[in-house]
Image (spheres, rainbow, N blue to C red):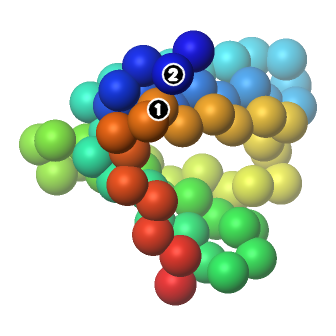
């Protein structure tokens, strides 16, 4: 699924979601929370406790804090 600016998330509930035009993903060193920022500056916060699987496109910048 390596689409450039796409993040694919499968949740524990069975639902899945594809976020497009993602420029960067901020996370802490334990990967307990993800902050997705798109090209327009909009942000989405996702707790890792609800994520079963996450895949990042090859052009998404991942920043650990």
Is residue 19 placed above or below 47 in the rendered structure?
Answer: above
Q: Are discs 1 and 2 less than 8 Å apart at CB?
A: yes
Where residue 10 appears, x then y in whole percent?
74, 26
What residue lies at 63% left-to-right and 34% top-to-bottom? 55
Density class for disc 1 (Cα within 10 Å; few <14, some 14-19, many ≥20) is some
What residue lies at 34% left-to-right and 39% top-to-bottom? 59
Q: Residue furthest left?
A: 40
Locate residue 47: give its quadrant.
bottom right
What residue lies at 54% left-to-right and 37% top-to-bottom? 56
**34 left or right of 57 in image:** right
Where residue 9 appears, x then y in whole percent?
65, 30
Q: Earlier in the sequence, mark 1 or mark 2?
A: 2
Is residue 13 placed above or below 22 in the rendered structure?
Answer: above
Identify residue for label 2: 2
Alpha carbon separation for disc pair 1 and 2: 5 Å
Is residue 56 placed above or below 33 in the rendered structure?
Answer: above
Q: Nearer the viewer, residue 47 or 22?
A: 22
Q: Secondary structure at mark 2?
A: loop
Identify residue for label 1: 57
């Amino acid at each position: 699924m390596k689409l450039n600016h796409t993040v694919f998330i499968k949740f524990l509930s069975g639902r899945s979601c594809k976020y497009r035009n993602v420029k960067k993903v901020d996370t802490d060193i334990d990967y307990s929370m993800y902050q997705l920022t798109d090209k327009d500056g909009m942000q989405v916060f996702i707790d890792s406790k609800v994520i079963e699987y996450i895949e990042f496109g090859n052009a998404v910048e991942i920043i650990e804090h």
